[in-house]
Every structure is written in structure tokens, then in C-alpha cells.
Amino acid sequence: MLSRLAARSAAVAAQHHHGARLCVAAPVRLFHCSEQHGRPIEPIPEEGGKVRMGVFPEEWFQFFYKKTGVTGPYVFGTGLLATLLSKEYLIINNEFIAGGIFVSFVVYIIRKFGPNVATYADKLRQERIDYIDNKKGRFIGACEEGIETEKKEQWRAEGVDYLFDAKKANVAMQLETAYRERLHEVSNAVKRRLDYQLDVENTQRRMAQEHMADWVVSNVVKSITPQQEKEAIAKCIEDLKRMAKAS
Amino acid sequence: MAGRRAAVKAIDWIAFAERVPPNQKAQFTALKAKSDAIYSKYLSTPEKPAAINFAFYKSRLANPALVDEFEQKFNAVKVPEPADTYTAGLEEAQKKAQADVQKFIAESNARIKGYEEQAAIYNNMPPTELMTYDDVFAAFPEMKPDKEKYPIWPHKPIS
């Protein structure tokens, strides 16, 4: 972060002091910047490289293997230590012991509290990443939902022809129904008039018949004389007597 | 008179119902009820009335000439078809509605494009793990620490 800041401010400074650059060999690209490329910067490795005996990188051993074989690095280390001690480049005195104690204390602190600090730092980083991912996800989701809704609305809007088809069909059906009703009306009117004629004639005929029957009966009744009545009664009595005798 | 008119076009009400927006459901239901009533009335009205048996009346009535006259005039009657004054208006309204729909679709497509552009800003970002702080602050300004309010040492710009 700070290095980037420094690099950027250096760039700004370089633009300002065009003539007098501070660097003797002014680099084309700024110090600490990678080569320019469009792809994202490669992630920094999470874990350190492989080491032997806690401090010596594996690469050093690999470097020796090609020249000296597998014991080379150890011989070199021992020889180096012996040289340092023998030529008194490394002096064992009270300061050396104090330095040893200081180093071991630092190692102890790192071993003891390092993992907790690392976990806490990871948590902070993960929170930020989650925040960003959440926001990105929600925004993209909202956009996709919006697109989906718009497409659905378009599809629905295209269904407007259904509405007009239905309306036209309704109009056609109503017209047809009205036309048929007119036909029915004409037919019914004619039929009703004919039925009326028929009824009139039937009624007249029935009344004429009734009248004739009444007239006949009344004339017959009128034509019966007292003489005939008396004869009829005498005949009835005679009949009754004959029937009594027969039984 | 039979087959005089083409059969009334059948409406696919199920497909229609699917396309009705939820806020117009009530109107759709009303239209459907109305149309159903019209359709059932249309179905219940037979195409031709029952034929009148003129021979029967002729044999019964005392005056067959009267029946003949009725028959002649009945056969001569030309029933006028009701004038269709609505379809033209509907056609016009349909054309207008289709134009509106085309306009809406164009607007909608523009909106979709806007959505896609907005989404592309986020879709084209590098994976979050690989973003630098500068990238993050450029994309999410609210994550940038407020140096005005909470200044850090040395509390003045580094010159």
C-alpha cells in the first residue's frame, strides 16, 4: 500500500520536475510496479516457502545439491560457522548470549500469538470480501431480475392481439345472435297470426255446433204435446207392470 | 342461409389468461364473464327457426288463399342483417395498441440494455480476492476510509 503510494507520488513528482529527475537512471517503469497488463495481479502466496531446521530455505539446499551432493550444504554450514568462530567474526560474549535470548523470545512470541493474529487478520479480510461479494451479487441479481421482468412484460404486451380477437369475436357473435333473433321474430309473428286464424275458426265452429244442438233440443221439447205426455206415462206404467209380472 | 357466415373464431382463453398482467386480472375476469354470456346466448339461439307447416294450416283453415298469401309474403321477406359498426373501430384500436406495444418493447429493450450495462460493470471486475485496495476503493467508494474525519499520523499530506 505504502509502496504503491510512494510509487504514485514519485510518478507525480516526476511529471512535475520534468527536467531534473531525482533518479540517475530513470526507469521507464516505476519501481515496484509490475509490467503493465490487463489481467488481474496474481495473488500473493498465503504460506511461506519450505524451510529446513526452521530457518534455511529449501532452495539453498537445492542449489548445493547440483554442485556438491546431499552433504554439501551441511559441510558448508559447519565450515562457515567454524570460520566465523575461528576468525572471531562471531564472538561468544555476553552480547551474543543476550542476542540469543532476544531472538528466542521473539520466536516464542511469534509462535504463541502469531496464529491468533493471523486468524483475526483473515477474519477482517474475509469480512471485506464478503461485503463486496454480497453487494456485487445483489446488484447483479437485481439487474437479472429486472431483465427477466422486462422480458416477461414484453411477452405479456404482445398478447394484446388476444384481447382484440376476443372483442371481435364478441361483436361477431352478438351480430349473429341479433340476426338469428330477427329471423325468429319474423317466423314467430307469422306463426302467431296463423294460429290466431286457426283459433278463430275453431272457436266459431264450436260455438255454431253448440248453438245448433241447443236449438234442436229446445224445438224438440217445444213440440211435445200434453196428449203425447200422458200416453208416454201410461206406457211407462204398463211397462213397469209387465216387468213386475215377469219377475 | 346456412354457412353464410364463417364460424366465429375460437379464443384460446387459457393462453390469454397467462398473458394478462396481474394488475389487470379483474378486467380480464369481467371480460371473460361477458364473453361467456355472449357465447352461451349465441349457442342457445338456433341458426334457423323451426319451419312453419303451411300445409297443415291450409288443410285446417277455411280460407287457403289466406295461407298462400302468408306463405308467399313470408318467403319474400328479406331479413336485414344488423350493421357492423364496431369492428372498424376495434381494428383501429388494435393498430393503435400494437403501435403502443412496439413502442413499449423498444423502451423495454433500452431498459434491458441499461441493466446489462450496469451488470457488466460488476461482471467485468476481477475476482474479489485478486482486487487491490485501489480497485476496491474505485469500485466501492463507501469502503474507503474517511481520512478527513479520522486522520492518521502524520495528520498532514506527505510532501
Image (cartoon, helix red, strand yellow):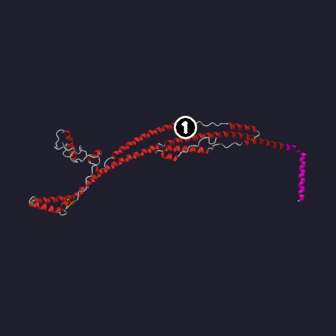
Tag 1 secondary structure: helix
Q: Which residue is mark 1?
A: B87
- Left or right of B140? Residue A10 is left
Front in this rendered view, residue B94 or A71: A71
Question: Does residue B16 belong to the magenta stretch?
Answer: no
Residue B102 image position (x, y, % from top left):
45, 39
Vertical side of A222 occupied by A106: above or below? below
Residue A154 image position (x, y, % from top left):
44, 43
- Left or right of B72? Residue A89 is left
Residue A194, by quadrant, is top right
- Outermost bottom residue: A71
Residue at position x 56%, y 41% from top? A170
- Left or right of A59? Residue A178 is right
Residue at position x 53%, y 41% from top? A167
Residue A245, by quadrant, is bottom right
Q: Is residue A231 visible in this depiction of the protein?
A: yes
Vertical side of B133 occupied by B96: above or below? above
Q: Main secondary structure of the magenta part?
A: helix
Q: Which residues are magenta?
A: A218-246
- Left or right of A37? Residue A232 is right
Question: Does residue A233 belong to the magenta stretch?
Answer: yes
Residue B95 image position (x, y, % from top left):
49, 37
Residue B110 image position (x, y, % from top left):
40, 41
Tag 1, which chain? B
Pointer 1: residues within 10 angstroms few (<14), some, or many (20+)?
A: some
Instruction: Specify the amino acid type for callout 1.
Output: Thr
Residue A61, by quadrant, is bottom left
Front in this rendered view, residue A47 or A221: A47
